[in-house]
Image (cartoon, grey):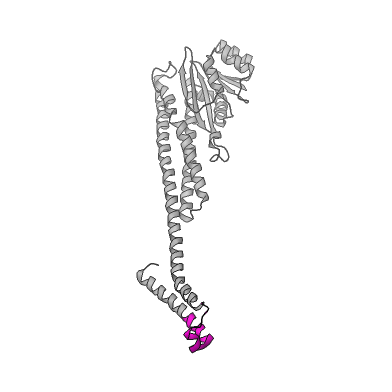
Amino acid sequence: MIKAVNFFNGTTVSSCNIFEISNKIKKIHGIIWIDLFLENHELTHDETILLSKTFSFHEMSIEDCLFSQYYPKIEEFENYVFCAVHGIQLKPNYFQEFEDSIYELNLFIGNKFIITLHTEELFFLETLFERAKTRPQIEMKNLETILYNILNKTVSSYEFTLEKIDDKIEHLEDIILKNPDPTIMEEILYTKKVIFTMKKIAESQQTTYGYFTRGNNNNLISNEYLVYFRDIYTQCARMNQGIIMRSQMAVNLIEVYMSSITVKLTEITKFLSILATILMPILIISGYYGMNITFPEHSMLGPIGSWGVAISLMFISIIAVHIYFKKKKWF
């Protein structure tokens, strides 16, 4: 799906017609932003004509848009810069299927135009596009403003995900301290997997954002706006440090879980050991009186008296063991 917005002399014109867009590009006035949404992960005939004929983009750049990958890319050409960055748009059950929440955003950037191309619907991009149509004096006053808004939202998506991870880690810590259930380990490993996947795609993003902080960026970014893109680069670096920190937190969470399980197992073992020690004299006494022979107590005290002696010895042994444990402060 193709849609475009053109800002010139204080007015905006939006269009979804390939012929109207092509005419505007030929006599390019002002700034034009074209957004392409590949619904079936394939370019339509009109989209192919727009990229390969109207703008004459290199076939390698067009091919990179069709085969998504985790690694960012930035390439300079004679009349444009091709850029591929990645962000996160969280979906339901994202901890179990986090990779499905990662999107790739491709950008073709020229002196008077910017083209965004993506294979899934991006809500933040839709919002920016609508704002560009309703407030063009602010959102489309120059190319740097459009590009900054897009890249800033892409990097901010990582920070939102990190906040979700923080909430998840805090929740898991509370559960582990109260009741380290075995199912908690599965959630910890899912969280660790999410952090690892974020780390894999985020570390390499800095190179791409760093390109827009330099003065030799194909004259796309004026010196006045370099500070804005340095802010994005710093935000990306801070984000990577945050991911590393949370990766360590996930490892610590596993250690805390294992320690809690060990403590719980120690308490159970202690209880069973005490119980076995208390019952051991009873088992000895019951084994003694359970033998199929005639005891002296039986001839002296009779059956009832022998039974009373056995029961008394059992209670005395329990009390004696209990007093001994108390003196040793074992419980």
Residue at horizontal 43%, vertical 55%?
262
Quadrant holding the C terminus? bottom left
Closer to the camera in the image, 306 or 23: 306
Where is residue 318? Give x, y as percent. 44, 75
Closer to the camera in the image, 96 or 211: 96
Residue range (magenta): 291-312
Q: How many marks?
A: 0
Residue at horizontal 46%, vertical 43%?
166
Quadrant holding the N terminus? top right
Q: Tell whether position 295 is magenta.
A: yes
**In the image, farthest residue toward the left:** 328
Residue at horizontal 46%, vertical 32%?
200
Closer to the camera in the image, 265 or 317: 317
Where is residue 192? Give x, y as percent. 47, 41
**In the image, farthest residue toward the top:** 27
Q: Tell whether position 107 is magenta.
A: no
99 lies above or below 214? below
- Residue 115 is at least partly visible in this image: no
Where is residue 217? Give x, y as percent. 42, 18
Majority secondary structure in the magenta region: helix
- Residue 128 is at least partly visible in this image: yes
Residue at horizontal 43%, vertical 59%?
266
Question: Along the horizontal axis of the image, is 68 left or right of 277?
Answer: right
155 lies above or below 186? above
238 lies above or below 298? above
Where is residue 55? Give x, y as percent. 55, 13
**In the image, farthest residue toward the bottom:** 300
Closer to the camera in the image, 329 or 225: 329
